[in-house]
Image (spheres, rainbow, N blue to C red):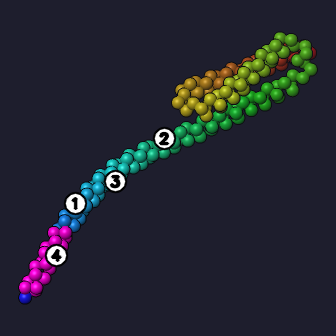
């Protein structure tokens, strides 16, 4: 019986030791659980911050898209205006060519008319060059639309002045031609 009591005491001591070990394991697990919960909270905070950043970036992306649409629209408008000016330039060149053909042999006898026509050619070349420069600048300078509009207005005014000069030259040539005969 003493042996049984000793065995029971030893078993009890072993159980108490295991109980203490289990308590220590539970405390360790609770500490690990607490650390995991803290890490989860930190990760949740990071997730909220990253979601805020994503929301901000998404908003910025949306604004940039709106700006891009505006720029594309402006570019399309500028290209349309350039095409219109190219058409006008083509008409002016065609008018010039028709008038040059009509002048034919009479141009040789009209020295002052030749000087005027050479001047007009120079003006046309200058306008062509300015239009080319305006076309190049238009693609690079969306922010300088006022300057571009001023150039277009100047080109339009120059085209009108050129047309008037061409009409004046045509009248002078007709007068000289008819008064010569």
Q: Nearer the viewer, mark 2 or mark 4?
A: 4
Q: Position of residue 46 (x, y in %)?
A: 33, 51
Task: State the separation of the CA atoms marked 3 and 4.
Answer: 48 Å
Closer to us: 7 or 20: 7
Residue 54 position within the rendered picture, expressed as x and y whole percent measured from the top left: 39, 49
Q: Residues within 10 Å of mark 3 (few under 14, many from 20)?
A: few
Q: Which image quadrant for residue 159?
A: top right
Picture coordinates of residue 50, whole percent (x, y): 36, 50
Does residue 65 appear left or right of residue 21 in this picture?
A: right
Q: Nearer the viewer, mark 3 or mark 1?
A: 1
**Which quarter of the rendered picture does the N terminus lie within?**
bottom left
- Which label's residue is closer to the chain start, 1 or 4? 4
- Residue under circle 2? 67
Sequence order check, earlier mark of 3 and 4: 4
User: 67 or 173: nearer the eye?
Assistant: 67
Against 51, is 8 above or below? below
Q: Is residue 128 above or below residue 62?
A: above
Q: Which mark is residue 158?
A: none
CA gap, disc 2 and disc 4: 77 Å
Left or right of residue 13: residue 56: right
Nearer the observer: mark 3 or 4; the answer is 4
Q: Residue at x 23, y 65 (%)?
A: 29
120 falls in the magenta region: no
x 87%, y 26%: residue: 101
Q: Earlier in the sequence, mark 1 or mark 2?
A: 1
- Callout 1: SS: helix
Q: CA distance from mark 1 to mark 2?
A: 53 Å
Start-end of magenta stretch: 2-22
Q: Which label number is shown at residue 14?
A: 4
Assign the magenta stretch its main secondary structure: helix
Determine which residue is flagged by label 3.
Answer: 47
Quote the CA–CA distance across marks 2 and 3: 30 Å
């Amino acid at each position: 019986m003493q042996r049984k009591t000793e065995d029971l005491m030893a078993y009890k001591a072993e159980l108490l030791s295991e109980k203490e070990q289990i308590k220590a394991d539970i405390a360790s697990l609770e500490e690990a659980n607490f650390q995991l919960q803290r890490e989860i909270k930190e990760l949740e905070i990071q997730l909220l911050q990253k979601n805020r950043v994503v929301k901000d970036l998404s908003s910025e992306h949306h604004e940039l898209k709106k700006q891009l649409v505006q720029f594309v629209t402006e570019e399309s408008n500028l290209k349309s205006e350039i095409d219109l000016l190219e058409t006008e330039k083509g008409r002016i060149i065609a008018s010039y060519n028709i008038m040059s053909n009509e002048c034919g042999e009479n141009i040789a006898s009209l020295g002052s008319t030749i000087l005027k026509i050479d001047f007009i050619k120079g003006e046309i070349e200058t306008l062509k060059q300015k239009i080319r420069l305006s076309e190049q600048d238009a693609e690079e300078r969306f922010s300088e639309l006022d300057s571009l509009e001023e150039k277009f207005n100047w080109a339009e005014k120059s085209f009108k002045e050129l047309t008037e000069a061409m009409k004046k030259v045509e009248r002078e040539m007709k007068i000289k031609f008819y008064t010569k005969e």
